[in-house]
Image: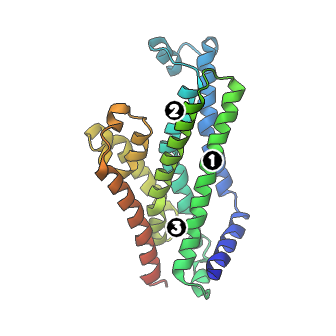
Amino acid sequence: MKDLIKALLAEFIKLKRNLILWLVWGAFSLVPIMGGVIMYLIKHPDIIPKTSILSMKLSLLSTPVNWYYYFSSFILQGSGLVGIIAFGFVASFLFGREYSDMTYRDLLSLPVSRITILNAKFIIYLLIAFFLALWALCLGFVVGLVLNLSQWDGQLMVKIVKLYFIVSFMTTMLGTWCPFFALWTRGYLAPLGFLIVILMFSQFAPYLGIGHYFPWSIPAIFSGMAGEELKRSLNFWSYFLLIFTSLSGYITTLVWWKYSDQP
């Protein structure tokens, strides 16, 4: 336990000396902010250029400007889509930076087990993902208050907030494969490429009718982004595959780091 605490303190010190996570924080903040900008433009359609895509869509449908639509369309669904990139990038950086900074030899020489070192990094990853999700949610409430959104429903908002944290948790768990690719390829470029491929497949899988069996599509489907009918297609095997993928990524990372030969 003492070794784990020491490893956690070391990781916190590393975080104080880099700007990458601040960039991720700023990028993740764009989800509620850009959602608020779109809601403002919908609320004031006169300032939207007639040739813009948003103006064309508004001419075809009536988009409500209220708390429910803002949170369900931007905050909730954004956590299922943008979260894959943001949380995956954080995981890639935390585990891959040791090779890019050439400090992995120092880690291996410490009188601390390899498993303890990785567990400390996983804990830091979970904490960062949680606070990013919490920050985006709080910022969403601030943006909603600034825009003076209508039709506040306390019970409905509580339901959306619960759903938001479930989707964020799903997305966070799926980030466990990024550390493996970061350690396996000794850097954080390969896991970023993995994220791009996964994001492409997660968008394409629902069109083939297999989205409810592709783990990285499940958070977005669960959030209702693809519609309620597709959400109802989620079953026991959907959640089993998501949990299995998350745990297998964590276990594979630990096994590879412990038994691989580190020159």
Q: Residue at horizontal 29%, vertical 37%?
A: 207
User: Circle 1 — which element?
Assistant: helix
Give x and y (percent) for residue 17. Answer: 73, 64
| Location of the N terminus (image quadrant) | bottom right
User: Is 17 displayed left or right of 220 in the figure?
Assistant: right
Q: Position of residue 215 (x, y in %)?
A: 36, 52
1 and 2 marks in contact (CB < 8 Å): no
Q: Nearer the viewer, residue 101 or 137?
A: 137
Percent from the top left, x then y, of residue 50?
A: 55, 12
Query: Residue at (53%, 43%) from the top-left corner?
Result: 162
Q: Nearer the viewer, residue 233 or 119?
A: 233
Frontmost of labels 3 and 1 is 1
Query: Which amino acid type corresponds to the residue marked 2 in the rendered image?
Result: Ser
Q: Nearer the viewer, mark 2 or mark 3?
A: 2
Residue denoted by label 3: 187
Q: Tell me the kind of residue under disc 3.
A: Gly
Q: Secondary structure at mark 2?
A: helix
Mark 3–mark 1 Cα distance, whole angstroms, equals 28 Å
Residue underneath mark 2: 72
Q: Secondary structure at mark 3?
A: loop
Near-viewer residue (95 or 224)? 224
The disc placed on residue 4 is: none
Q: How is the image coloured?
A: rainbow
Residue shown at 43% from the left, 35% from the top: 225
Q: Residue at x 62, y 71 (%)?
A: 101
| Among the two numbered marks 2 and 3 on one chain, the one whose residue lies closer to the N terminus | 2
Q: Is residue 203 above or below residue 149?
A: below
Q: Is residue 222 above or below residue 174?
A: above
What residue did someone put label 1 on? 134
Query: Is residue 153 in view?
Result: yes
